[in-house]
Image (tube, grey):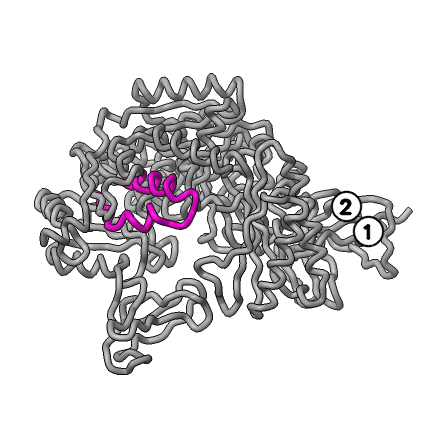
Amino acid sequence: MPRYADIVLPLYQPTYTFEVADGCDLTVGEAVAVQFGQKAVYTGIVWRIHNERPTAKQIKTISQKLYDKPLLSARQMELWEWIADLYMCTLGEVMRVALPALIKPRGADEESFEHEQFRPRTLHFVTLCGELAAEERSKMERRAPRQYELLTQLESRGELRRAECDAAALAALRKKGLVELVEREVEGCVESECQYALPTLSECQQKAYDQIVHNFTQVQTVLLRGVTGSGKTEIYMHLIARTLAAGGDVLYLVPEIAMTSQLLARVRRVFGERVIPYHSKLTNVRRAEIYSRLNRSEGGELVLGTRSALFLPLHNLQLVIVDEEHDSSYKQTEPAPRYQGRDAAVMLAHLHGAKSLLGSATPSIESYVRAATGKYREVVLAERYGGAQLPEVIVSDTIRAAKRGERKSHFNKIMLDKIEERLERGEQVLLFQNRRGMSPYVSCGDCGWTARCPHCNVSLTLHSGSRLTCHYCGYSEPLPRRCPACTTAEVKPMGFGTEKIEQEIATLFPEARVARLDRDTVTSESACNRIVEAFERGETDIMVGTQIITKGFDFSRVTLVGVLNADNLLNAPDFRASERAFQTIMQFAGRGGRGAEAGEVVIQTAEPDHPILRQVMMGDYVAMAHAQAAERRAFLYPPYSRLIGITMRYRDAKLLHRAAIELAERLRGRFARRVLGPTIPPVDRVRGEHIVEIMLKIESGASFSRARQILREIIADLLQHRDYRHIVTICHVDAS
């Protein structure tokens, strides 16, 4: 009897059915090469095997398997299906982000289809291969103590990883023929190897650790709410060691690549080369190697990565840690699947029967409410490690400072005085400005002309080198000397970004060593590491940055952090603006005072009496969370509802608006007042395409799965209209 297989391809397409060739032994989850279209050959994943012949007249045949074992486990397939269903995309779109590029090769035809079988990576170990006479040993002990120490370590332990050895001492011993390097494939850890030099927990940390372990016996998910600098990472390490000792896998998620360098060094000091970093800045070859090796592992793996690490094959997953769980970077916006990494991590743990720990000093309102209602258990870590005090918060009124002549350039006097104090004492400063570039826009003072992108409805940002750049499409042009509209006046920079602050700080404090950390300087993982490591070593006095510098860093010499413009956080057009402003400022405030010296925070704002800033001054997360939760309950916003943002894009503005109005009317016929819009967003044209948005709000208690199904059907029916079939329509589940 003929056999057929439903194949998932890395395309915006449903599964396609192929016939299985005689003698081709397939199982679900395996990768196969299939011809799609006239000639193109793709890697596909076998999703289902059955005997149901499709209605198509011609059915292509599968004849080539690509790997000697399935690429996906049953649990991975369940996660893909959950993501595709909840976030309203196809399995093919999940496949595009879930599998490394080299794991899923494609070709224009069979001859150009290149497939490489990736093998487990190897590590270098150092072993003894010669003996030293007693006289030579005595001489080495006196004249080369590092070589002698390494030699005695090898004699007692048998072998060492190369990474554990002093490089100069190792080279010298190799030259003398006393040691050699041995390559060995890395496999999963066995229990007897899981002995680590773990950091000692304080009394407060130990109590939190014990509570987490106890709560894990009753629930799957625990929320650890610990103030900044309380030592959450040390607790994570103890939980990781406990899991690895049992032969389980651990997935440790962080929101940003920039965080991984410093955190990776801390975790590797305990777990060594066992730690596997995984993020988008790795090479394609490295990502493929990691995926292949983990797919062969039987357990005992520790992966430290960003949200994409969710899709790695961890077959014995027992613990998932989501650090800084509140961070908006966990939400994928483009391309599909537009998933929330935190929620997907909790689901991944659930599918494996594993435990999930969400950690943050300022948890998301969603997680806080889930803990308050008993879905999660909450553990509070209220003290900073070592008894350090939380930084003192000073709110500085920019309007009052300007009126009193106490404002110089973009700095209030108190900010400059505090910076000068720190520099005199040899301490470090962090300055936060949530815009990059020299100035957000340039304008003519006579006629009001503003430089705008010809492809997007946004102003161009001025960068160093007198270049105007669009942060949406990348368009760039030189800064005009005269206004193109009136041709008489010079255009002037308006506002300020991180480049401008870096320039002004260098002028105001010429002796200070200044660095900048933003998307323009973090062009690669190594570039980011250089900036962070130089600051950590004390080679930089002041670091200016965007939101990157507010997250997770631990700099012991920083005693002052400055927020240069809190107003653009407080007044963002988003129902989450107050929550995110509190989280950002509190997280940034926590970067200061982590060493022996107390820290201070200076916040510049035109709204010194804003409720969020009062809550920041008191460090009162609970008051903020209660106020925001009450407001959202009253207006039916998450977590008391689920939001689906519908974005429609097309080059013809009139046709787009007509389609949006018709879609909104159809939706109101089924969802009534739950439909908001259509509305025109602040940025209503990007890369030449006009944009219109509709919001669908589904209250808690209503069937969200049924709502998504109705929405799919209505959109599919609308796009069958010949005038609308080319309009791009995207659904953002759990949109802001």
x and y percentages locating residue 295 in the rendered image: 60, 41
x and y percentages locating residue 504 in the rendered image: 17, 59
Residue 608 colored in magenta in the image: no
**Residue 482 in sight in this render:** yes
Q: Classify residue 126 as left or right of residue 662.
A: left
Residue 567 colored in magenta in the image: yes
| Residue labelled with disc 1 | 20
x and y percentages locating residue 535 in the rendered image: 24, 48
Other-residue count near label 1 (Cα within 10 Å), few / some / many at <14 / 14–19 / ≥20? many
Under mark 1, the amino acid is Val
Numbered disc 2: secondary structure: loop
Eyeballing the image, is 63 above or below 602?
A: below
Q: How many marks?
A: 2
| Residue labelled with disc 2 | 26
**Residue span colored magenta:** 561-588
Instruction: Evaluate if marks 1 and 2 touch, with contact meaning CB atoms under 8 Å apart.
Output: yes
